[in-house]
Amino acid sequence: MSSEFENLQAKWQKQKKELAEGPLNFKQIQSTIEGKAKKGLSFHYGNISILMVTLIGLFLFFYYVAPVQELLSRIGVGLMMMGILVRILVEIGSSIKANKINSLDTALKTTEITIDFYSFRKKIHGPFTHIIFGLYIVGFYMISPEFSVYFTLWQMILMDVSCLVVLAFVYVQMRKGIKNEMKMLQEIITLKKDMIEE
Amino acid sequence: MNKDLFESIHKQFFTMVHQMCLGFVKGDRDVASDLSQEVFIIIWKKLDSFREASTHKTWIYRITVNKCLEFIRKEKKNQTVPMSNFGKELKEVTVEEEATNGTELYRAIGQLKELDRLIIMMVLEGQNHEDISEVIGSNPINTRVKIHRIKKRLKKILENE
């Protein structure tokens, strides 16, 4: 097997030589790398920004456009905003964990930290997703009685049903994402087992 | 940032990284180019933090291995191409082309498990089991046994092709 492997090694080296013969414009490569290195913002920061804008938008809407007067409605608005705030906190926690994943560590350590990250996501996904959706739905329907003073019955039905449809769609999408992440967690655990197996 | 050092590292290790990425993605040149570029973005960002606790080669291997494994995770998350088919979508190549561009060898390596692909490519590159265990973070004895098993598996794959 040794000589067969040496043949393979020679083939590998020959191919390496052929690869090295390709044209390389270092100046161009360097400027591409430099540009991309500056752009590299994580997925979590994008999520946090979107959620922050949504929270601010919601606040401005209920402050300037539709300032609700009744206590029940005000609590409702508070609950809706709290739901988004909880989600922002969860994303901040996630990004702190994600930032610990360092490509300079050994593959085993990186894998362990990645497992820790996905395990954290697993822990928060279950209860927090339901809490967030619960807060949002309850909050929304608490505003409904005051809104019904200004809107017709059909407008109210349309608003309430469309809210449910949108939330159901978001919920299904989120569940898909969670399912994907949990599958990934299992695969990373298997990868770690592969790394340490005797 | 020491630009001269980066240039010298790029010159010295680009082909090594690129070939490893090629083998990992079963010979898909476009994906391998993107992947090697990502490796060099990390090198660019982190070069100042290199502390000479290991050689540049080991340091770059760590980044390459981690980036390749991360790439697989990203691909699975995006699910654009089922990973079981990944690499099968390669453009049709003639026998002559295949002989020169090494797709056959990369495809064979691509049939191994993800971690095994990375390990065997380091072996093909001439790294010993201790260097490899420094990159992976596993026990050197386990690594030696693992390398033996992977070599056998690769031989079987090549025989069946």
Image (cartoon, coloured by chain):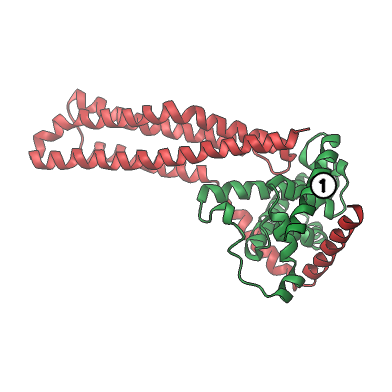
Examine the rendering and report whether any part of residue A31 can be seen: yes
Name the residue nearer the viewer: B37 or B48: B37
Examine the rendering and report whether any part of residue B20 can be seen: no
Q: Amino acid at mark 1?
A: Thr
Q: Label 1, secondary structure: give it.
A: helix
Q: Looking at the rendering, in which quadrant would you find the C terminus of chain B?
A: bottom right
Q: Check disc 1: other Cα within 10 Å, few if <14, some if 14-19, many if 20+.
A: some
Q: Position of residue B2 (x, y in %)?
A: 78, 55
Chain A shade: red
The subunit letter for the residue under badge 1 reads B
Tell me, by letter, which chain the rendering colours green. Answer: B
Q: Position of residue B117 (x, y in %)?
A: 73, 50
Q: Residue at x 68, y 35 (%)?
A: A192
What residue does disc 1 label? B58
Identify the image quadrant of residue A177.
top left
Q: Residue at x 86, y 43 (%)?
A: B129
Q: Position of residue A92 (x, y in %)?
A: 51, 34
Whether residue B96 is situated above or below residue A115 in the rendered picture:
below
Whether residue B14 is situated above or below residue A1 in the rendered picture:
below
